[in-house]
């Protein structure tokens, strides 16, 4: 008899345990709002993650309160899963669509309120409740952009300077040149919302290239202003580079460490990998090096070139490579080759900070100098480097000596100028009149 009486007692005890431990659990749902800033734009999608592993989700409610009025953005209920199980849904990612115009909300401060409830039997069956409140600023107006600079004459493969002012603080702004972005840099003018940046046309961008300033504010509103400009088309020289067996035998062993299994390749096959793949890899490295330029304008006046040197190759030359009278490759030469006496001292073209001083693939021993606001000079194929990364150098300071490191066939200096990530024609920066008319005059007109 005692055994039979024990069965209902055990069942009753089990029910009590379920009631107290499982169905009466006191943990409210977890919530995570994916909202990077406190701004709400004219329309955007918020991501809300809610989870309740024990009792399951009963309801999610989201609203914006402004000027004493409630604007419900989401009110979603979830079905129960049974007496013991609780709610069927244990985790939910809810996409909340916010549209200020549809909701009738105007710009200004507001409160975003979120409530999540579970299927616990707490609170007389109403469940546990989690609240989240976040002060927000509704901003539906795009930033206003004022172009401060007036002179924007560009050559294909050349550079210019653009200055502009924003009506509000924006986390991102800059100049779009075709599909290329040049970030605006503040700090030159007293006003923090005034920006200056060097822009560039690459050698393929001609007179039809569009130029405009864009700005993205904290609420995601986009502003745009066209930049009045004129672009001069340029035709660049074409050249043929003959590759000989003796060059392959002398140079290719230096590059075997760059590619796995390259010892099994012929000299010609390795050359093609170097000239194509390594060239692209080196450019990606250069883009990383110049990604965060100084916001100080270090340089002044015309840029110096290698003394007593002769041009051996020009900017944007289209090179056709041949081997045994057959075309094997085509590339573009993005610099100027200057030849003087062997191992000639190489001066810094202007004042700046050394941001790279090491070997760089096809360029060999290379120095990169940051002149500020996205302007860089590059010195390659050096036989020796006499400066260190982080060092400030003045115009005419010797940074190294000419050489034939990298993919150079003879002793010379490969000199390049870059505007942010774009190689530009060094001839402009060697021309004092061009600098005065296009850079210095622009700065003076804005000040």
Image (spheres, rainbow, N blue to C red):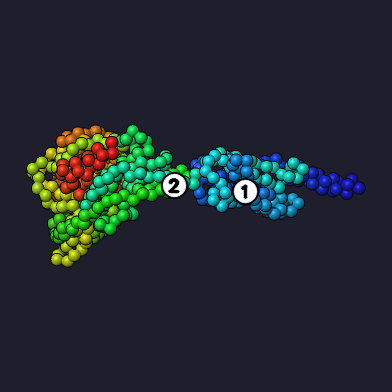
* CA–CA distance in space, label 1 to label 2: 25 Å
Q: Nearer the viewer, residue 392 or 447?
A: 447
Tell me residue 268's x, y (percent): 21, 60
Instruction: Find residue 183 and name its label.
Output: none
Residue 123 visible at all: yes
Neighbours of disc 2 within 10 Å: few (<14), some (14-19), many (20+) = some
What residue did someone put label 1 on?
72
Quarter-of-image position of residue 127: top right
Tell me residue 59's x, y (percent): 67, 49
Quarter-of-image position of residue 275: bottom left
Tell me residue 284's x, y (percent): 31, 50
Say what secondary structure mark 1 lies in: strand
Say what secondary structure mark 2 lies in: loop
- The residue lying furthest to the bottom in this view is 326
What residue did someone put label 2 on?
142
Is 38 left or right of 15, judged from the image as shown? left
Residue at position x 67%, y 52% from top?
77
Neighbours of disc 1 within 10 Å: few (<14), some (14-19), many (20+) = some
**Mark closer to the chain start, 1 or 2:** 1
Residue at position x 40%, y 45% from top?
144
Residue 414, placed above or below residue 388: below
Tell me residue 391's x, y (percent): 25, 33
Residue at position x 31%, y 35% from top?
189
Residue 404 visible at all: no
Is 378 left or right of 260, judged from the image as shown? left
Is 276 left or right of 413, judged from the image as shown? right
The quarter of the image holding the C terminus is top left
């Amino acid at each position: 008899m005692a055994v039979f009486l024990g069965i209902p007692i055990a069942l009753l005890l089990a029910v009590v345990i379920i009631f107290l431990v499982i169905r009466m659990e006191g943990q409210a749902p977890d919530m995570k709002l994916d909202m990077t800033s406190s701004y709400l734009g004219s329309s955007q999608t918020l991501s809300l993650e809610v989870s309740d592993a024990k009792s399951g989700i009963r309801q999610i409610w989201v609203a914006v309160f402004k000027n004493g009025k409630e604007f419900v953005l989401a009110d979603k209920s979830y079905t129960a899963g049974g007496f013991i199980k609780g709610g069927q849904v244990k985790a939910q990612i809810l996409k909340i669509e916010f549209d200020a115009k549809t909701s009738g909300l105007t710009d200004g401060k507001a409160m975003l309120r979120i409530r999540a409830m579970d299927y616990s039997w707490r609170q007389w069956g109403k469940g546990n409740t989690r609240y989240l409140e976040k002060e927000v600023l509704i901003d539906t107006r795009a930033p206003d952009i004022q172009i401060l600079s007036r002179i924007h004459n560009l050559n294909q493969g050349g550079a210019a300077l653009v200055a502009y002012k924003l009506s509000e603080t924006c986390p991102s702004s800059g100049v779009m040149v075709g599909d290329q972005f040049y970030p605006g840099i503040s700090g030159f003018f007293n006003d923090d919302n005034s920006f200056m940046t060097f822009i560039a046309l690459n050698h393929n961008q001609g007179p039809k290239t569009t130029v405009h300033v864009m700005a993205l504010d904290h609420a995601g509103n986009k502003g745009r202003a066209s930049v009045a400009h004129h672009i001069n088309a340029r035709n660049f020289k074409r050249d043929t580079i003959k590759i000989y067996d003796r060059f392959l035998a002398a140079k290719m062993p230096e590059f075997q460490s760059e590619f796995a299994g390259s010892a099994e390749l012929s000299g010609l096959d390795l050359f093609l990998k170097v000239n194509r793949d390594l060239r692209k890899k080196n450019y990606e490295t250069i883009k990383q090096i110049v990604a965060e330029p100084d916001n100080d304008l270090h340089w002044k006046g015309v840029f110096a070139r290698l003394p007593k040197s002769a041009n051996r190759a020009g900017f944007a030359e289209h090179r056709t490579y041949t081997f045994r009278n057959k075309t094997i490759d085509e590339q573009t030469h993005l610099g100027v080759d200057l030849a003087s006496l062997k191992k000639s001292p190489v001066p810094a073209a202007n004042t700046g900070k050394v941001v790279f001083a090491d070997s760089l693939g096809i360029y060999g021993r290379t120095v990169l100098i940051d002149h500020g606001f996205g302007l860089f000079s590059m010195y390659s194929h050096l036989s020796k480097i006499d400066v260190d990364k982080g060092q400030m150098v003045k115009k005419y300071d010797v940074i190294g000596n000419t050489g034939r490191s990298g993919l150079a066939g003879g002793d010379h200096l490969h000199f390049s100028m870059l505007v942010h990530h774009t190689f530009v024609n060094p001839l402009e920066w060697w021309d004092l009149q061009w600098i005065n008319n296009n850079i210095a005059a622009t700065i003076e007109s804005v000040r």
